[in-house]
Image (spheres, rainbow, N blue to C red):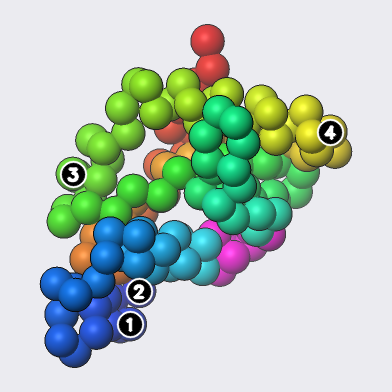
Amino acid sequence: MNFASDAACPPSGCAGMTHAALGKRAEDHACRALVADGWTILGRRLRTKSGEIDAVAEKAGLVAFVEVKARPTLAMAAEALRPRQQKRLTAAAEILLAENPAWGEQGVRFDVMLVDPQLRVRRVKDAIRLN
């Protein structure tokens, strides 16, 4: 989904925005893309002792743990998820699943939502596999 019609940055530019503000803006657009595709957002910025999950979404019983990566290009965003972070995400997901046993009746997967400065969003489905 493309949100390029929305201003990616305020008229003064992104220079004054903090990294956290840019990240939240990317997460907002990623969640809008999920909702537009029929997903329900179960939670955002869910913190556990193992780390934070940017979003958890559900569609027809399938739960997706979503990591949002915003970078200058979609390719750079795709490269940003490193193995160490993948381990933290899967550990955090295990905690959330234990706390929410009804989640994932039809399965669980890990998606990555890539966002560029024009707020183009691309989803990589099943981007992380559990060993």
Name the residue beneath numbered marker 2. Answer: 3
- Tell me the tag on residue 76: 3
**Which range of residues does the magenta coloring cover?**
34-40
Q: From mark 1 to mark 2, how far is it between C-alphas?
A: 6 Å
SS of the residue at dot 4? loop
- The amino acid type found where label 1 is placed reads Asp
Label 1 with label 3: CB-CB less than 8 Å:
no
- Which is in the foreground here, disc 3 or disc 2? 3
- Which is in the foreground here, disc 4 or disc 1? 4
Q: Identify the residue at image location x=22%, y=66%.
A: 117
Name the residue beneath numbered marker 4. Answer: 101
- The amino acid type found where label 3 is placed reads Met
Q: Residue 84's x, y, as percent? A: 37, 22
SS of the residue at dot 2? loop
Name the residue beneath numbered marker 1. Answer: 6
Rendered position, 24 above or below 131: below
SS of the residue at dot 3? helix
